[in-house]
Image: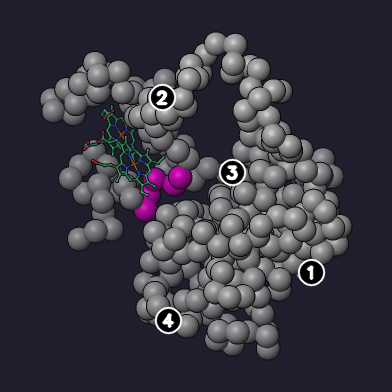
Amino acid sequence: MERISRRSALKTMGFLGCATGCLAGGLMAGAAPFSGPETAMAVTAGRFAQKDAPFSWKPHVLDAKVSAPVAYDGYWHQGYGCGYGVFYAIVGVMGEQHGAPYNQFPFTMLEVGKSGISDWGTICGALLGAASAFALFWGRKDRDPMVTELFRWYEQTPFPVYDPGTDARGVPGALPTSVSNSPLCHVSVGRWCQASGFAEKSKERGERCARITADVAVKAIAIMNAKQAGTFAVAHGDPASVTYCGKCHGPGKESPLLKGKMDCTPCHSGSPHTADKFKNHP
Ligand code: HEC
Ligand code: HEC
C-alpha cells in the first residue's frame, strides 16, 4: 500500500514529529537543541531572559460594551484590520484606562493579522489578535483552554452579530450571517461570500469583518474577565468530526499523523476514506 510505505519512509528518515522543531533547534547557533543545562538556565539568565518574558503583565477587567465599538473602529482605522482592531480593543483600551505598560505596546504590530496574515487567508486575524492578547498575560497551561473556547465559539457561531447601528462605516443595516466551521480566514470569508452572494472585495464583506472584529473582542473580553474572576470554563464542545475522527487519528492512535484541533468537515468529508475527501471542491 502506497500510503503505508510513505509513512515508513518518513519514519526511516527520522522526520516524524520533527519537521519544524528540529529545524528551529538547528538554527540556534551554539545551542544544543532541547537538551543540556542551557535549556533550564535560559529562563532565568542570558538569552531569552529579557524583561517581562514570562507572561508577567497583569490583566485588568474590561467592559465589553466599551471595547466593542473600539474594535469595530480599529478595523477601519488606517485600514489596519481585524487583528489590530481586536488587540487594540483589549490591550489598547487597558492602556487608555491604566497607562503603562499597556500603552507602551507597538499596537500596529498586529496589523499583520489583516486578511489572515498579510492577505494569506490563514488564521482569522481577529482570532490572532485575541490569542496574542491572552498571551501577554497567561502562559500555555492557562491560555490554551481560553484559546480553545474562543476558537470553538468562532467555528460554531453565525456571524456577524455586532450591529454598529448608525455608526456603520461600511454598509448600514443587517447583514446575512453564516457559520464558518473553521478558524481560517479563507474558509470563514469564503463561506460568507457564498451564503450572502457578496464578493470578497465588496464593501459588505469588509463591513462583515469589521463587525466580526467587535464580536471576537466581546467574546475574548468575556473569557479574560471570567479568567480573572476564577469562573472561566470551556463552554463550546468539540464538533462531532473531532470526536469521531479523533478515535483513530491523533497522537498515540492508529493513525498518528494528525496535527491540530480544527473541525475536520470543511476540508474532509464525512467519508474521508473514499475518493470524495475534499467534498467541497467539485
Ligand atoms: C476507525 C478508525 C478511523 C476513523 C474513525 C477515521 N479514520 Fe481516517 N484513517 C484511518 C486509518 C487507519 C487510515 C490510514 C492510515 C493513515 O493514513 O494514517 C486513515 C486515513 C485517513 C486519511 C488519509 C486518506 C488517504 O486517502 O490518504 C484521511 C484524510 C482521514 N483518514 C481522515 C479522516 C477523517 C476526516 C475522519 C472522520 C470523518 C476519519 N478519518 C475517521 C482510521 C480512521
Ligand atoms: C483546513 C483544511 C483541513 C482541516 C480542517 C483538516 N484537514 Fe486533514 N488534511 C488537509 C489537507 C490539505 C491534508 C493533506 C492531504 C494530502 O496531501 O493528501 C490533510 C491531511 C490529513 C491526514 C493525513 C492524510 C494522509 O495523506 O495520510 C489525516 C489523517 C487528516 N488530514 C485528518 C484530519 C482530521 C481527523 C481532521 C479533523 C480533526 C482534519 N484532518 C482537519 C486539510 C485539512
Q: Residue furthest right?
A: 98
Q: Is residue 134 magenta?
A: no
Give the labeled residue for mark 2: 26
**Where does the image place residue 20, in percent across and percent down from the top left?**
39, 32
Residue 5 coordinates in the image, percent (x, y): 16, 22
Q: Which residue is mark 4?
A: 202
Q: How many marks?
A: 4
Let me know if residue 210 appears in the view.
Answer: no
Question: On residue 54, which mark appears?
Answer: none
**Residue that carries the numbered disc 3 in the rendered image:** 148
**x and y percentages locating residue 45 in the rendered image:** 69, 23
**Element under label 3?**
helix
Mark 3, mark 4: which one is toward the viewer?
4
Bounds of the magenta segment: 262-266
Against 158, residue 109 (above or below) is above
Q: CA distance from mark 3 to mark 4?
A: 31 Å
Q: Where does ligand 2 appear, by image quarter?
A: top left
Of labels 2 and 4, the one closer to you: 2
Ranked by sequence position, the earlier of labels 3 and 4 is: 3
Q: Amino acid at mark 1?
A: Val
Disc on the earlier residue, 4 or 1: 1
In the image, residue 264 lies in the stretch drawn in magenta? yes
Element under label 1? helix
Give the residue at x 37% y 53%.
266
Mark sitting on residue 66: 1
